Amino acid sequence: MSEPIDIARRGLLFVLSSPSGAGKTTLSKALLAAEPDLSMSLSATTRAPRPGEVDGVDYDFLDMERFEAMRAAGKFLEWARVFNNCYGTPKAPVLAALQKGADILFDIDWQGAQQLRGQLAADTVTVFILPPSAATLRARLSQRAQDSAEVVAERMSAAAAEISHWAEYDYVIVNSDIQDSLMRLRAILAAERAKRNRLTGLSAFVRGLQSEL
Ligand code: 5GP
């Protein structure tokens, strides 16, 4: 016997951070493909698009002036400077999604995770992705043809800084196998969705249940 049960729920902000090269982009894509009720937050950035990146899909690519105007107008939920570029999460779509009970995936750095946690603590779930070894990280970064050797070196040292924030996260996954990491991410998401304090329709549901007992 199975009846559809629809209990109203507040959405959650599912944040993934990692050093560049730990497999976070691959994992985010796999998670989005596996979870139809999860959608990606679209960040704004002043960084130039890489080959193949599409404006409005990968990022909203803004010049510094427009980014600064949005920042000054308080239109970012969080923003940070990463690798000499600015990145930020526009506030309005996130707040609207939360109200609707929609879950949003964020690929943001530790500074962004910290700010989200500060502003929307009860709604934010954070996961840090670690590479299985420094050698794997170096190999993955070197394979990225788009980035120069100088950028690779810069990102290796940035990785050490990013990793130093691992203990601020709710969950940590060592990404040695994509399928295994994906399974863990989905398990975390399922458990967090089932938390009592997110199920805003639960007391009404239980009252209805009790009235018929
Ligand atoms: P990339 O330039 O390689 O796309 O991203 C560089 C770093 O910026 C990554 O660690 C990514 O998680 C982070 N990032 C991307 N968008 C945002 C954002 O909106 N806010 C913050 N704080 N970090 C971001």
Image: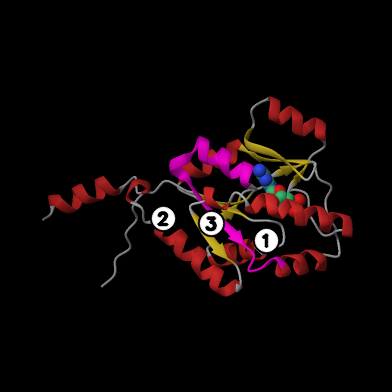
Which range is magenta?
110-134
The x and y percentages for residue 62 are 79, 39
Instruction: Tell me the quarter of the picture where residue 193 sits.
Output: bottom left
Instruction: Tell me the quarter of the picture where residue 213 sits.
Output: bottom left
* Residue 94 visible to an observer of this rendering: yes
The x and y percentages for residue 116 are 55, 40
The x and y percentages for residue 35 are 52, 63
Q: CA distance from mark 1 to mark 3?
A: 15 Å
What residue type is disc 3 on? Leu
Q: 163 and 66: which one is in front?
A: 163
What residue type is disc 1 on? Thr
- Quadrant containing the N terminus in the rendered view: bottom left
How many badges with numbers are in the image?
Answer: 3
What residue type is disc 2 on? Arg
Camera-near label (1 vs 2) is 1
Mark 2 sits on what residue? 193
Mark 1 sits on what residue? 25
Q: Residue furthest top?
A: 72
| Side (left or right) of 199 relative to 85 | left
Q: Callout 3: helix, strand or loop?
A: strand
- Give the numbered dot on residue 38: 3
